[in-house]
Amino acid sequence: MAGEDELKLLGTWASPWVSRVKLALHLKGLSYEYVEQDLDNKSDLLLTSNPVHKKVPVLIHNGKPICESVVILEYIDEAYGTTGPSLLPTLVIPWKVAFTADGEEEKTEGIKQMLAVVQTLEGALKECSKGKPFFGGDSVGYVDIALGGLLAFLQGTEELCGTKPFDIANTPLLLAWVERFTALDAAKVALPDVTKLVEFAKTKRAQMALSIKK
């Protein structure tokens, strides 16, 4: 599209959904303005751009807001001319259960489900990549971006939940994929620091526990 395009991304640094959109924009080589949002004190721009859900990410393209990360990926794909499958890993639901569980039994079940999804992704990588570096083959595709946006959280899972989602014994292909993906310039720019994210997640979990007690 024309160089006159104006792209603005509303997000928070710790959000995997925002990281997903950042990855797509960087991989496309698109220039954009990033506007960090405080979700405890939402800006007028966020409230007017996403008045229903009031959440990030929101991509504003020439004044037009697009909400929800998968919708944004599809929009970027259509607007900037690359085709590919729109597939979203279902990893985040069991991960969230494992992270926010009140009891050990619920946490164990969440971890079990998460590892089952990871095994499915290992098989999908083998089938889709056909020996090539990424889910998309020789180049990064939608699945790579969708899963890649979650990587910082997944890499912090060992400390946060006491389990390691990727290892050489059970997921050798995914482990190698993680190394390749995180080495990408786009990933280095878009993904949050894992250590910082772990500390942020611990703080949020403590706040959640405190609010439950109240």
Image (spheres, rainbow, N blue to C red):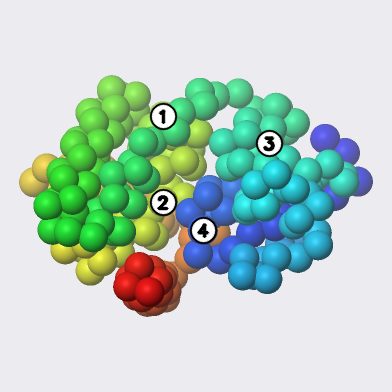
Q: Which residue is mark 1?
A: 137
**Mark found first going from the N terminus, 1 or 3:** 3
Q: Residue at x 21, y 47 (%)?
A: 110
Q: Is residue 176 above or below residue 71?
A: below
Q: Position of residue 4 (x, y in %)?
A: 91, 46
Query: Could you tell me how far apart the alpha carbons at marks 2 and 3 are, in whole angstroms?
Result: 19 Å
**Mark found first going from the N terminus, 1 or 2:** 1
Q: Residue at x 56, y 66 (%)?
A: 13
Residue count near mark 3 (Cα–Cα under 10 Å), binned few <14, some 14–19, many ≥20: many
Q: Amino acid at mark 4?
A: Ser
Q: Quadrant of residue 152?
A: bottom left
Q: Residue at x 76, y 55 (%)?
A: 47
Q: Which residue is mark 2?
A: 150
| Lateral position of residue 189 relative to residue 36, left or right | left
Query: Could you tell me how far apart the alpha carbons at marks 1 and 3 are, in whole angstroms?
Result: 20 Å
SS assignment at label 3: helix
Q: Amino acid at mark 3?
A: Ile
Query: Could you tell me how far apart the alpha carbons at marks 2 and 4 are, in whole angstroms?
Result: 9 Å
Query: Could you tell me how far apart the alpha carbons at marks 1 and 2 are, in whole angstroms?
Result: 20 Å
Q: Which residue is mark 3?
A: 76
